[in-house]
Image (tube, rainbow, N blue to C red):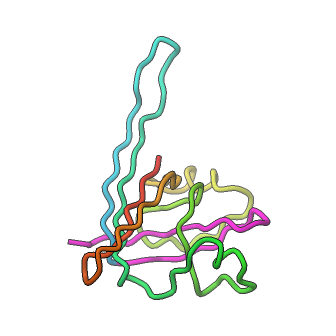
Amino acid sequence: MFPHTVTIYNKDKEEHYHRKVISGVFWDSSKGSVMRKTGSTAADGLMLIIPFNTDKTYLKPKEWLELADKSTNWTLQPKDIVVLGAVNYEIVKSGSELSKLFDNVLAINNIDTRNYGGGMAHWEVSGK
């Protein structure tokens, strides 16, 4: 049910990105565009489901931002970047460089916490 692996790039206060690979998730994305009177607009979308039990190193965004060493923990926050697959690439300048190198690169817009308890607790991440 959760066959995918993703790489999440978390942005810190200094605009640096920190990479974390997470397995055991569900990725469902779409790519496309919408034609409007003013021209074409991107209509890319993402639904990413991450079970709570996937990785115990998750921290809430404010906790994560306060860490001195962010290498072992990760978080979910708007404007972070998610890539389908295990990516071994460090961002040098900006997140836009990922789109030039990899397919299935999307920015996180919204995170819904679904804390149902037991094995059903998860985050629903949407993006474009």
Decide whether residue 11 is among the magenta residues: yes
Q: Position of residue 77 (x, y in %)?
A: 56, 63
Q: In this view, does 48 lie to the left or right of 70?
A: left
Q: Position of residue 86 (x, y in %)?
A: 45, 73
Image quarter of residue 93: bottom right
Q: In this view, does 50 lie to the left or right of 118?
A: right
Q: What stretch is highlighted in magenta?
A: 1-23
Q: Is residue 47 above or below residue 19?
A: above
Between 99 and 39, the residue placed more toward the observer is: 39
Q: Main secondary structure of the magenta part?
A: strand
Count of numbered marks: 0
Residue located at (50% from left, 17% from top): 39
Q: Is residue 8 left or right of residue 61?
A: left
Q: In this view, does 110 lie above or below 57?
A: above
Q: Position of residue 62 (x, y in %)?
A: 65, 72
Residue located at (61% from left, 68% from top): 10
Decide whether residue 56 is among the magenta residues: no
In this view, the residue farthest toward the top is 37
Residue located at (51% from left, 55% from top): 108
Q: Where is residue 64 in the image (x, y as percent from the top left)?
A: 64, 77
Residue located at (56% from left, 75% from top): 60
Between 5 and 118, the residue placed more toward the observer is: 118
